[in-house]
Amino acid sequence: MAQKRVQDGIGVVDLMIGFPFHNLRAVYTDTRRGLKDAASDELKMPAGYMFKDVPGEAEESVTPEEVIDETFSAMDKEGIEKGLFGFSETATLAKKLAPERVYFVTEFEPNKGMEEVRRIKEIHAEHGLSAVSVFPAGSFPQVAVSDPLMYIFYALCVELDIVCISNAGIAGPRYPSSVQHVMHFDQVCYDFPELKIVMRHGAEPWEALAVKLMLKWPNLFYMPSAFAPKYYPEAIIKYGNTRGADKIMYAGYYPSGLTLERIFSEMQDVPLKPEVWPKFLRENALQVFRMG
């Protein structure tokens, strides 16, 4: 008999998942604008130096339907019921094929102001968004989490009743990272008590501060996206096992940097309490993102 896995029977919700890319380098064209070092320019993915065994690109001959089927099969293998996918033509097709499995997020560029606000409203009206996301250090020029340029987007999230996801902590690509200092979230949560905001990509080296702020603000959450489970911050695991069981949510990084197989292989050794696993892998995401 196969050994029971921590995710078995839960119906995992993956809050950062996508479909294999035909051209990974092209996906990150905008992200390269602020990079200055030649070594980064040689990488297909700007933070590629941090990852090993990155999932391969899809062959040009592979159809969108085949890419979708490949992803759904990988999800089934690891017990993932549904996911939050970046809005795209492929994701839109996948939503038509399996509406109960696919939910949408779109990333915004805060420097574009009302142009982006209108785009988000149009997508939400036609397709329905569960969230928007932002990469403060990767904006060009950079925009801090608590910068006034962000505030129209936070207000929009409140208006549309959707979640805002923001990178937190040291950026993976070689950018300055002060705009993602976790302390910025303190001001945002104060100014927008109705906003549901989620810190993504670890918040290191300020993960202890992230815990303090989540204890303080009921509308602030965390997901360890882009982290292989063996590197989940100790402070976050301790928090999840105590007062933070309702505040932490699983998010992977497939296909940008991690395979689902690696994620869930390492997940077996993460020392969360048995009663926390359903919350971390499913229940918190369903409640915060209203994903069915």
Image (spheres, rainbow, N blue to C red):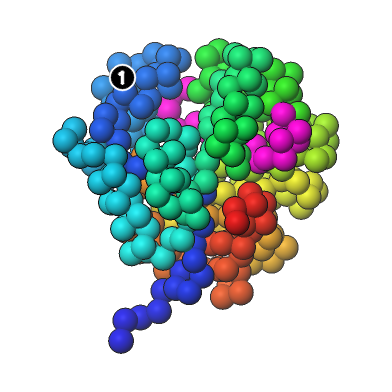
Is residue 230 inside the magenta stretch?
no
Asked whether residue 94 is in view, the answer is: yes
Going by the numbered disc 1, the residue's amino acid type is Asp
| Residue 280 spot, x, y in % from top left | 58, 61
From the viewer's perspective, is residue 276 above or below residue 252? below
Give the quarter of the image for residue 80: bottom left
Q: Is residue 167 left or right of residue 77?
A: right
Q: Quadrant of the N terminus?
A: bottom left
Residue hosting label 1? 41
Report which quarter residue 5 is drawn in: bottom left
Point out the image quarter for the C terminus: bottom right
**What residue lies at 30% left-to-right and 31% top-to-bottom?**
24
- Relative to 44, residue 54 above or below: below
Q: Residue at x 32, y 47 (%)?
A: 68
> Which residue lies at the image location 76% right of the left edge and 33% below the top edge?
159
Place of residue 143 in the rendered image (x, y in percent of width and height, measured from the top left): 62, 19
Q: Position of residue 111 (x, y in %)?
A: 60, 14
Camera-side residue: 95 or 281? 95
Q: Residue at x 73, y 49 (%)?
A: 214
In the image, the segment drawn in magenta is: 156-175
76 is higher (above) or lower (below) than 197: below
Count every numbered label the image shows and give the total.
1
